[in-house]
Each structure stands twice: as structure tokens, then as C-alpha cells.
Amino acid sequence: MKDYLYLQSKYVVPSYANRGLTIVRGQGVHLFDVEGNKYLDLMSNYGVNIFGYGHSQINSTIINQLKRLTNLHGSFTSDIRAEASEKLVKRCGEAYGKVYWSNSGAEAIDAALKFAALSTNRKKFVAAKNSFHGKTLGALSATGIEKYRKAYEPLLWQFVQVDYNEADQLKNAVDEKTAAVILEPIQGEAGVIVPDKKYLRKVEVSCREAGTLLILDEVQTGVGRTGWFLASHADSVEADIICLGKGLAGGLSVGATIMTNELAKKIPKSSHTSTLGGNPLVCAGVLATLKSLDEKILQHIKKTGRYLINSLKSIKSDLIVEIRGEGLMIGIQVSKDRDRILKDLQKNGVLAIPAADDVVRFLPPYIISKKQIDEAISVFRKVL
Ligand SMILES: Cc1ncc(COP(=O)(O)O)c(C=O)c1O
């Protein structure tokens, strides 16, 4: 057998941590390594494979489109892009009118920042400390996590960082020069930080009062992750721009920047485009995902999320500091040994991911059952 670990480390730029595991296949909520070992997936590839692996309806829709047409530049009309755009915009809610398609979460953020600057003629933004919006230069400029920014400073434009979940501080930072406020409804990379119930609502009001746009980065919280199609739906908050990515296209690369018609009117032709953005293959993945993500699965996410949190809370361990989350976006803050815990989970057949320096993050596929959660909890208990 080829030494894939060696090959990858020889030929791929070493900018990723290496988990020392060669995964070759997935089925349902399980991933399989090159030796045939089975892993219970509690991370869905950082939130991408929301329906797990081998979902028959999503796969057959993508395969059919693969045979028909994979690429079509945005200057042509595509039947499947038109349909996916209509379905996505409507699913986001009445406030929204149009979508700009790209290929990743960071690209969706870059587009949002450019559209906000274009439509307001301003380049000042208010963002949150410890936020994560992606690693392209634009998205990184909005990102608050110091370790990602440091080597690349000075970054772009003017981003004022305020404490997350401090509505008054944010209100004071917004002025007539501010193009937009950009926030995650729940901070993911910062350690699954869930704000107070009224926080987003207060932010929306401050933005309206100041005539400032509100950009919600729902790349991680969106597309059902919290048990709502958008996390902001839970609080009936309407933004001017919503950014989506990750699991929106059934596992294919996607970014989507959804905005109001009022804002879209101010975007000139050729001001921002992408050769592959919104290609028919990806749009087939979007259509299949939206179809599968019905009310029943959203209820399942809420219910199994509560079950997972309650099961975690039943574990007696001095290592656990706090358990936080909504739906199937869950963080377990530990007092020490975070990396050892992740490694031992992997050794025992359970895959989770890190967040911040001290949080074990679970972003399981939505199809996970209570029985599979029980299995994961028993491994987690043992590892702690
Ligand atoms: C909230 C949030 N925004 C943006 C991104 C960037 O997405 P991508 O890695 O697809 O560029 C991420 C990725 O984890 C994210 O969690």
C-alpha cells in the first residue's frame, strides 16, 4: 500500500495540522480509514457533510447534473442556478431578494464586505473580538482571532473590534462612517460562544438606527446547524446580508452571499464575479440539500442536539468547565488536556474537532441517531 501520509506531507504545503489519519471513504455517519477502521463522525468535516456520507437523493441529483452540465459562466442563464437561487433566497426569508454565488465561506464574506463598501461608499466595519470569518485577506481583516491575523498585518480597510455579546459597546462603535457590522450569530472558532438571547436583536436595532448594514456570517451556524435554517431565524433577526457556505451544496465547494433587493440594486456589473461561482453542479447540490433539509430534520436537529447536550452534562468529570451550544453545534470547554482528549477520541473511533485553545467541538451530521450519540458519549466518558 502507498504511504499516503508521507506523500501528502511531501507534496502538500504544510499549513494544516496533521491528524495522522488517512480517510478513504464514508457511509452514513461513519468514515473509514485506509486500513478499514471505522470512525463515528462528530465533525462532518468542519460542518460540511451535514447529511453524512452517501445520501442517496443528494448523490443522485449531483450525479445526474454531472452527466448533463457541470459548468456555466454566470453571464449565461442556467436552469439549475436560477432554481437554486430562488429556493435559497426564499428559504432565507422575505427580507432577502438576491444571492451572489462563490466557492467558499471566506469568499462569501469577501463578497459581503465588497458589496457593503460599494453600496455605502464607506470602508469602516465593526466586528467582534475572537470572531472567525475565514482566511482570505478580506475575511481575515474582519476576523478577530489574533493568531490568524498577526503574520499578515497590516490588513485591509478599518475594522473596529468590540467584545462579543456586548450590545452597548457595539452600539457606541457604530457611527455615520460605518459601512456594516459583521457578526457570527454564535461564534464557532472562538469556542462555540452563544450570546444572550436578545443580543442579535439589539445589534439589528443599533444598525437600523445608525443607517449601517448588518452582515450575519452564518457560514457555520446556517443551513440547519442550530435547528433553524438560519440561526438568526430563532430570534427573528433580519440582516442586510447573510453569508453561507460549508454544507449548503451537499459537500461540494460553495459560498453564498444573500442580500436585500435594495442592496443588490447598488452593485454595478462586473464589480465582483467568479468563474466557477454558482456552477450547475454545485447548484444541483444546493437544490438537493434544500429539499432534504425539511422541517422534520430541523426538529430532529433540535431534539438530538438537546439530547447530546444533556448526555454531556450527565458526565461527571473535573475536566469539564462548560458545555455550550445550540442544535448540533456544541462546544465542551475543558480545564486542560484538550489536544490529548481529541487524540484519544480518534484512537477510540470518534472524530471531533478543536475550537479556541480549550474547547472540543462537535458538529455531527444531522442524521445522527440517539443510539450513535450514546456510543459517542460512552467513548467520551472513557477518554475523560
Ligand atoms: C463562521 C465562519 N465564517 C467563515 C468561514 C470560512 O469558511 P471557508 O473555510 O469555507 O473559507 C468559516 C469556516 O470555518 C466559519 O466558521
Image (cartoon, grey):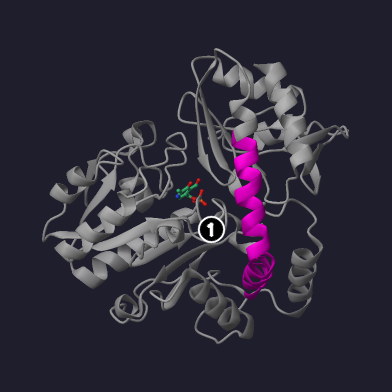
Query: In what quadrant of the picture does the N terminus appear?
Result: top right
Question: Would you say residue 283 sits in the magenta stretch?
Answer: yes
Q: Nearer the viewer, residue 298 or 97?
A: 298
Q: Nearer the viewer, residue 132 or 91?
A: 91
Task: Please say if 113 is above or below 190.
Answer: below
Q: Quadrant of residue 155?
A: top left
Question: Would you say residue 198 sits in the magenta stretch?
Answer: no
Query: In what quadrant of the picture does the C terminus appear?
Result: top right
Q: Is residue 39 left or right of residue 164?
A: right
Main secondary-structure element of the magenta-colored stretch: helix
- Residue 33 placement (x, y as % from top left): 81, 35
Q: Is residue 217 left or right of residue 10?
A: left
Task: Please say if 348 is above or below 63.
Answer: above
Q: Quadrant of residue 363?
A: top right
Q: Is residue 73 visible?
A: no
Task: Please say if 224 is above or below 83.
Answer: above
Number of marks present in the image shown: 1
Which range is magenta? 280-309
The residue drawn where x is 77% and y is 23% is 348
User: Mark 1, residues whose alpha carbon is within 10 Å: few (<14), some, or many (≥20)?
Assistant: many
Q: Nearer the viewer, residue 119 or 193?
A: 193
Mark 1 secondary-structure assignment? loop
Q: Is residue 182 left or right of residue 71?
A: left
User: Which residue is disc 1 drawn over?
Assistant: 228
